[in-house]
Amino acid sequence: MTFQPQIKIPATYMRGGTSKGVFFNLLDLPEAAQVAGKERDALLLRVIGSPDPYGKHTDGMGGATSSTSKTVILSKSQQPDHDVDYLFGQVAIDKPVIDWSGNCGNLTAAVGSFAISKGLVDPSRIPQNGVAMVRIWQTNIAKTIIVHVPIRNGEVQETGDFELDGVTFPAAEVQVEFLDPADGDGAMFPTGNVVDQLDVPGVGILQATLINAGIPTIFINAQELGYDGTELQDAINSNEKALAMFETIRAYGAVKMGLIDHIDQAVARQHTPKVAFIAAPKRYLSSSGKPIDVNDIDVNVRALSMGKLHHAMMGTAAVAIGTAAAIPGTLVNLAAGGGVRNSVCFGHPSGTLRVGAEAKQVDGQWTVTKAIMSRSARVLMEGWVRVPASCY
C-alpha cells in the first residue's frame, strides 16, 4: 500500500492572553481549505490532533485543553476601514468538531501582532515607535475589535513587564477594545430580561442572567448550585456529576437564548454559550498559591469552556462579565454590590482581572458601546506545521 507524504503549511504558534493557538494566513492554506467546509475542518482537526480518545493531543499541536486547542485564520480585511479579518475555530478534543460560532477574546490579543508581522496591515499605519492601532473584523460574530500593539523600531514589541494572572511570565501589555460587543445581530438580553427563571430538569429552577456580549453567556448564582465562587479547577473538573449538571444548564440556557432549537443540538455547539457562576467577594488562594483578598475584587466568577472549568477566564467571557456588571439588576451587577459602574475587577481561579465597559439605555434597552481589557501576546514558534496529505 502506498501512503501519501506529509505536506507542510506555513504557521505560527502563538500565545494570546491565557490561550494558545495555531495561526494561519488564509492564503497559505491549501486551496481546498481556503474556503469554509469539510476540507478546512478536516485539515485543522489534524493540525490540532483531534479527535483524540486519549485526550492528550500527542499527535498534534493542541494542548488537550479548551485554552490550547484553537485555530486562527487571518487575511487582509474585506471590510472598509478594517485592517484584518479574523476567523476563530474552537477545536473539540475528543470529537471531530470545530465550533465556529464564537470568538476567542484571549487570542484576539495576538491577532494584531501576527497581522503586522505578516504584512496584513498597511505599513503607513505602523509607527516606527509607539502603538499601532489594528482594526480587526471578527468574522465569527461580525464585530469590530481594536487592538493596540506596542511597536519598537518598526517591529512588534512582545517583551515587557505587564503581568497577567494565569500566564507565568510577564510581557508587553496589549489593550483590546471590543466595540459594540453585544454578540451577533440580536438583543443583548435575548429574552428581554436582565434576570430570568431557567427551568433545568434534574437541577431545578435557577435565576439566570442570559447575555449576548463578547460571547453568549449564562450567569448563575454560585450559591444556588452549592458553591461559594472560590472553587479551583479540580473541584469541578474531577466531578463528573458536576460537569454533567453544567452541560445540562448550558443546553437549556442555549434554547432559552434562541441559539439552538432543541437541547440535543448543544452537542454540536460546544463553544457557545458559556456557563459561569458568580458570588460576592470572598478570600481564596489562586491556583498558583497567590492569596486573593476580599478587598482585591468586586465579585468572584468561575466559567466553563468546552465542558471544563477554565483555568483563568476566557477573554470573551470577561467582556460578558464587564458588560453585565455595568448594567444594574443583572446577577453579576448584584453580586458586585449593585449600582452603576464602568469597570469591575473579578476573581478567577488563577487570580484577578479588571475589565471596563460603557453601558447606556437607548429606547428602554441596554446597550454597551465598548468593553476594554488588557492582555499580552507572544510568538512561541513559527515555521511550518506538517500533516498527512490524505487528512483532508
Image (cartoon, rainbow, N blue to C red):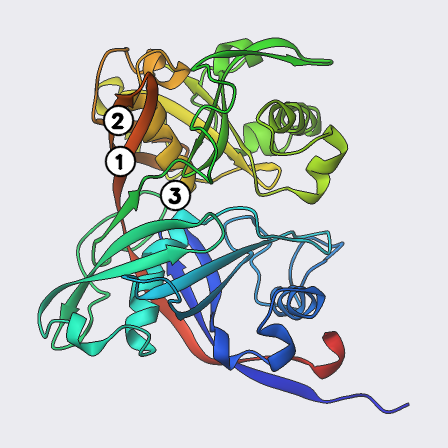
Q: Which numbered marker is on residue 369?
A: 1
Q: Which numbered marker is on residue 315?
A: 3
Which of the 4 quarters of the picture holds residue 366? top left
Image quadrant in which the N terminus is located: bottom right
Crowding around mark 1 (Cα neighbors within 10 Å: few <14, some 14 to 19, many 20+) is: some
Query: Which comes before the other along the chain, label 1 or label 3?
Result: 3
| Residue beneath the point at 33% across and 16% down | 364
In space, the residues marked 1 and 3 are separated at their CA atoms by: 17 Å
Query: Which comes before the other along the chain, label 2 or label 1?
Result: 2
Provide the residue designation for mark 2.
359
**Location of residue 106 in the rendering, given as x and y in whole percent from the top left corner:** 39, 50
| Residue beneath the point at 23% across and 25% down | 296
* 224 horizontally vs 293: left or right: right
Q: What amino acid is at disc 2? A: Ala
In space, the residues marked 2 and 3 are separated at their CA atoms by: 19 Å
Image quadrant in which the C terminus is located: bottom right
> In what element is the residue under mark 1?
strand
Which of the 4 quarters of the picture holds residue 116? bottom left
In space, the residues marked 2 and 1 are separated at their CA atoms by: 6 Å
* Residue 246 appears in the figure: yes
> In what element is the residue under mark 2?
strand
**Location of residue 213 in the rendering, given as x and y in whole percent from the top left corner:** 41, 34
As displayed, is residue 39 above or below residue 195?
A: below
Tag 2 and tag 1, C-beta contact below 8 Å: yes
- Nearest to the observer: residue 379 or residue 151: 151
- Nearest to the observer: residue 240 or residue 26: 26
Q: Which numbered marker is on residue 74?
A: none
**Location of residue 274 in the rendering, given as x and y in whole percent from the top left corner:** 53, 34
Tag 1 and tag 3, C-beta contact below 8 Å: no
Crowding around mark 2 (Cα neighbors within 10 Å: few <14, some 14 to 19, many 20+) is: many
> Which residue extends farthest bottom?
2
